[in-house]
Amino acid sequence: MSHHLFLLSPSDTPLYSLTHQSLKPAQTVTSPLAANLPTWSTSAFAGTLTALSGASSATQPSTGSGPTRVGGGQDRHVIQMIANASLDAIEDVMRKDSAMYLKAVDKFNDWTVSAFVTPGNMKFLLLHESKNDEGIRTFFMDVWELYVKTLANPFHSAHTPIRSAVFDARVRASAKKYL
Amino acid sequence: MDTNTFASLAQVQILLVPVGAIPQATFEKYASGIRSFETIRLSDIPADHKDEQANRFMPSPLSTGSLQIRFPTHPPPQTHLPLSLLRPSHFPFAVIGIASFPQGSSPDPLAAQLDAVISDMFPERKGLWPLRGVRRVLAFEEGDNQTQSDDQNQNTAPPPPSVSVIPSFMNNKKLYIGTLVADLCSQILTSFGTVAASLESPVGNEYLNSALMPQLLLEDVPLPLSEGTPSRPDSTISLPPSSSQPEFSRPFTLSAAPGTLKRTSTTTSPYRQSSLMIPAAKKRISTIGMSSPLGRLYKMLGDFYLLSGRTEEASKWYSEAITVLKSNSDNIWYASTLEGLATAAVIDAWSAGQGLHSSTATAKEPWGHIGEKLGQATALYHKTSTPDFETASLLVYLYCLCVLRHTSLYFAIWSAKGWGPLAFTAMLHPGPKPYLPPTLAHDGSRDWVTLERLSHISNVSRSTISSILSNLHGPWLLHLGPRERIAVLESTASIYSSMGFKRKEAFILREVLGSLMDLIVCGRDEDGMSQPNGAALQTGGLGIHNMTPGPNQSWGGVGVRLSESVRGNESILFVLKYLCRTLGINLEAVKLHAAPEDPSSISDSALITQYEQEETEVFQEPFGWPELQVGIIREAVAVAEALPDYPSVAQFSLSALKTLRPYLDADDQDRLHAKSVESLRVAVRRGDQRCIEYWSGKPVLDVTLAPLPTIRLPIEKPLGMLSSKDNSVPLLLQGGTDPFLYNPRRAQAGKTTSLVVQNEPLEFLVTLTNPYVFDLELQHLSLSTSGVQFETQPMHYFIPANSTMDVVLTGKPVETGTLTVRGCFVQAPGGLMREFILPLNTAEEVDRITKKRNSLACEFERHKYWGIESFPWQKAGRRESTQMAIPSISSFKFLQCKVVPEQPLLRIRRTTITHGALMLYDGERSSIRLTIENISSHPVDFLRLAFDDSTQGPAQRALAEGDLSVFDTYEMEYKLINAPVFSWNPEEVKVIAPNQNLTLTVDCFGKVGCTNGTVHISYSYTERDESKESGMFYVRQVSYPLAVTVYHMLECHAMDIAPFPSYVNNADFHGRLKSGKRKDLALDDSWGWCLFSVEVRNAYGLPFDVTFSRIGDGKAVASTSTTIPPGSMSRIILPIRKIILPEEAINKPIPTLSDRQFVVAKSDLTKAEQKVQQELFWYREELLKSIRGEWQETGGVRSGVLSLRDQRMTMHMLEAVRLEAAKVELTLVSREFEEPILMVGGRYMPLPNQFVALRARVENLVDEPVVFTLDVDVDPSESIVFEGILSDVPLGRLEANEVRDFCLGICFLSSGRFELSAQARPFGIPHLEARTARASIIATIVDS
């Protein structure tokens, strides 16, 4: 089961992203509708469609639950598209809701999107497959703290990509702990 | 295309097809006329009483409901046939052919044509729908009304029953058409009855339950209304062989024989109002098909009732169906029933609200139960497993439709601000185009406030809608056929778009594009396959390589496209651009222009705006998701390539390169660039007129004028300078230090425009930059100039990757005046030319840009807007921060050159020096000759030589420092001016005609310390009209540098001046002198001389002859020479005349040769000392004038002067050289009576112990009367006796030139040598006191 974390600047530019493979087994229920998908065409455009609709992950051999899907089996591009698309829902919710943690704010192609909006309008997006509200909330708080520490760097602005190895290591540790 | 209306289940579809030759516009016109009958009141439907058997769906005359009708123009595809029972509303029940026929012709063949059309559409006649016979041709007659009677006559012959002629003269066509439609509806309802009846039969029910999606295939169903075949002889029941479970694989046909129908009809209750008879019917039906559950049948009946507009019955039948289907877990049918039920509820609400015209706000959320039903249906569809591909496709289609229905319920409520008539209108809207509620229809309705207000009013949040809609999306979309998939995705995208969820919309649009492009590519593949090889070969020359971007597909052959249709390309590209914009990519950052336009037509203000944008582009905030953007750009390029639309390929690639450069890696940059180049080439080859503007940002950083070569550089001088008198002060000594701290003239001096010459080549250094990883090709690079005409050749240039470099652009101004360089024209291959302006970096300009940048830097990273709204193009309409506003200016200063008229050009043709080196001895004088040639077509009538050497600089610096003594200053200035290294004779100058030579002689003087020198030849052509007009002339310079070596060889030391010795009076000596070598030195007069002596040392390795001469009247009158061997030193002695300078000459201060101002006398000498100094100075000057030292190489030809200027003059020397105030003559005379005193060798030889007289004759040489005193000295005085006093003997006042004698008697007391001397001193006149005159004689006393 994989998690995808994105830290987005207010102009929707990712400053940091992380793909985390959790050891917990995925508990997705695939719909019978998604079985036996046909291959219509071999053109590249059909490939786009396959990827975007999430079929490429569904047609993966779903024999093993966890370990076989290491690497996500997901097109990174599609994950990013989903994360980007979910910003619509997040923006909608965050205008009405002052809470920072927006849990399961959007769902798309088996992915649940949880978000965390900092007062500085940074958005932390987490794409996950299973429900783990409390863990995700704790994880987000951790990331927030780490982010605030990074932001304390006077040379760091709201648009500077985060390349700190320490930040990365700590986020990974936190992800391992809570996700 | 299908529109997924919410109430599609309740809508009767009537297919509109064109019949015969009818223009599309005409068809659309009539079709829209027909489409205005969206609903038909049940009471308007004529009841057909001819056959009572099938009339149970007929409305009662008084019923209040209405029939919903939809008029599609396209039939559902063949693959949807399995849905014919499950979803009857999906199919058209009737067909209206629309035909137009010219007046006078017969509409008869139209019926047959319609049949043909239908059989073409439904080729295998397998479908249940459209029902046979329920078809009608509306033949619109074209033409005017004048042949009315003829028409009447012609139409008297009744047209076929299925053809309704609408004459052109008919006034109320609409009413007529309405009647026709109602009539058609009546037929449809009747046919429902027939179908229902056949299904009610046990066999029918069996088939109904036979499969997941059973089909009822009617072969020639003898419908009651199709009058042509009331009973066909061959229409027998062809049931499959006695099996209650028919094979699934085989299409199951139910051939409804008349007998069967009759039988059914007998059992069917002929009630028109069957609502009360449901239990009866149920009971009755249950007796028929016992073997299979009746759920599906009930559901079918419900469907029919719903279609018939009788929701009450429909709901009842549906409820019945649910109970059965639920227990059977017949998921699809159950879900479909739920959908029907939901539709019925909405229809109910609609008809209720129709009368009320107000929103029914009784319940909190009246739509809640409807939504629940649909949600349930969605879940049921979702759970269903699929046995095979085909069914799966349809199942997914149903699922998607259900989700869309569910979504559109909420969406309609949301967009209509709640549950009300507007929402019902939205849900029931049947038209061919999607219905956009008025709340969203106007511009500017997509901002958050408006959308959120809708949510607030309607109590439906957007996220609710979104979450329902997101159910639709999943891998199963791949099951759908392309057409359905596109339709479903389009509906999804439009809902997202309407809700303002742009990014989700973009996501879906990508899929839509993917599906479309897949179809295009696959379609093309099939085309390519179907081409015979011969054709490919024939057109091979024009064929293009298939641009299919499949990475792992290799196309070996030549893809041939015979005729390429570009229809639709534009729309696809539009969608592409739209979705890219949502993701923050501006695919049109580089614009396409329809036709090449003249770059000069762009207005200056536009250029300035561009310039300012480019200046501040640094502060472009990042926006969007770069990684995604790069991915989408790749796809966009692939899409444009696959269409193919070559200019767009280039546009997208280049836009990406322009806007996304920091994020594109090297490979991508290379690929995109290569693609753009390639596709532009193809576009040109294909004659595409569109052109792409210049794209690579700002490639030109700077333009500067390369400095002209010094020989070509013109220098402007006012004409008045020629006529003005020569300045007495040599230029060498002018302009030392500037006394002003700030000299505005000097500040101005550096900023004058450069001068260039007409018709001579100019070079400009253009700094180009290329930030990309590939070599940037500039097809055209030229200067943009204004002002005078400038001839230049454009360049083709490659800027190497990732580099900044200078390029030289040459050109030639062909007029005089001001040449302004505005910037550069740049053109990339296949693109448009673009002008980049490059203002000068003046202080104001730099200041302005800095200010602007600072203000931007201030706003940088402060975001008021986020997400999509932070994209740069969204900022256009927003209010800018006012305090940051920098006034933009409308004009700039550009690089300017002043073009002056053509000038002559000289060159040095030859010189007499070899290797450019000059070797001189110290003080040597020689000359060199320079031959100059005029290589231009203009004469040179002005020529001046100026010189520079290495001794000047240090001297000038020392002078400028000003801490030298007055004397030293004079010496230095004297050397600079009077002893220059180079000099020339201005008399040699004459006009040099074109191509003529002139030889100039330059005199050289060896000056120790000189190491190099330069001859500057300034010349001009002044006598011309242009000069007279402008009052200016232009001077050019040729310089000839020389290396100079000066050998130091003779040194002068110890100059001295001694009084003349007494023996000069010796006649023997004179005699010897005159006969000897140095006869020149012989003196005519023994008085008034002194002796000059100097030591000369030869420090060189060669002997030199040295000659010192006395100058009289400007020429040498006497000289003394000697040869000084190397390393030795000789003393040179020369008698010179004593000098007397007038008082006023002595009293002048030491002059300065320059006119330097502010020379403050720094000496702290007393007046007396100063006087002495002046006296020394002037006498020295006089002395140096009277002596000339010269040398010559012994045995050689080289000669020069020996300077004594280094020698100092002392007071002692001054006294020696100065002429006395009086002339004193001493003689020893004897008494008158005695013999005169013997003189031997100039000595007196008086006798001892005898009185002799010592006579001193004093002559006043001063021009005024002077009182003299005389002192007489005798030595040794003890051996002499004398008479009177010896000292301070008053001589009295002597007039000028008066002579007075004084006699003193003396007696020598012993033999020996006596020296007698006298000095006459002027008395009482201070300035004469020093000029004491002396004389002495020697007497030798010999004992006799």
Image (tube, rainbow, N blue to C red):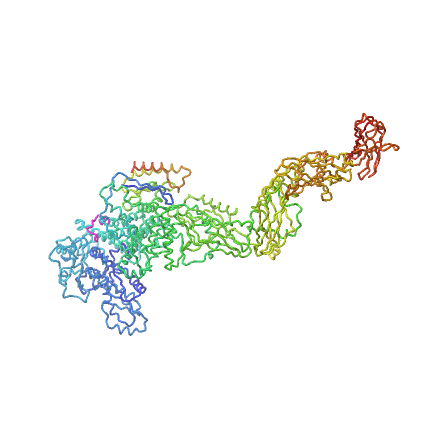
State whether residue B1230 appears in this view. yes
- Membership of B165 in magenta stretch: no
Predominant SS along the magenta part: helix
What x and y, as percent, mark residue B48? 20, 64
Q: How many marks?
A: 0
Foreground residue, B647 or B533?
B533
Residue A33 shown left or right of residue B721 in the figure: left
Residue B442 shown left or right of residue B976 in the figure: left
What x and y, as percent, mark residue B340? 23, 53
Toward the top, the furthest residue is B1278
What x and y, as percent, mark residue B1203? 66, 40
| Snapshot quadrant of residue B858 | top left
Specify the quadrant that holds the C terminus of chain B: top right
| Snapshot quadrant of residue B1262 | top right
Foreground residue, A53 or B1272?
B1272
State whether residue B419 appears in this view. no
- In the image, the segment drawn in magenta is B378-391
- Membership of B387 in magenta stretch: yes
Specify the quadrant that holds the N terminus of chain B: bottom left
Foreground residue, B690 or B1074?
B1074
What x and y, as percent, mark residue B447? 37, 50
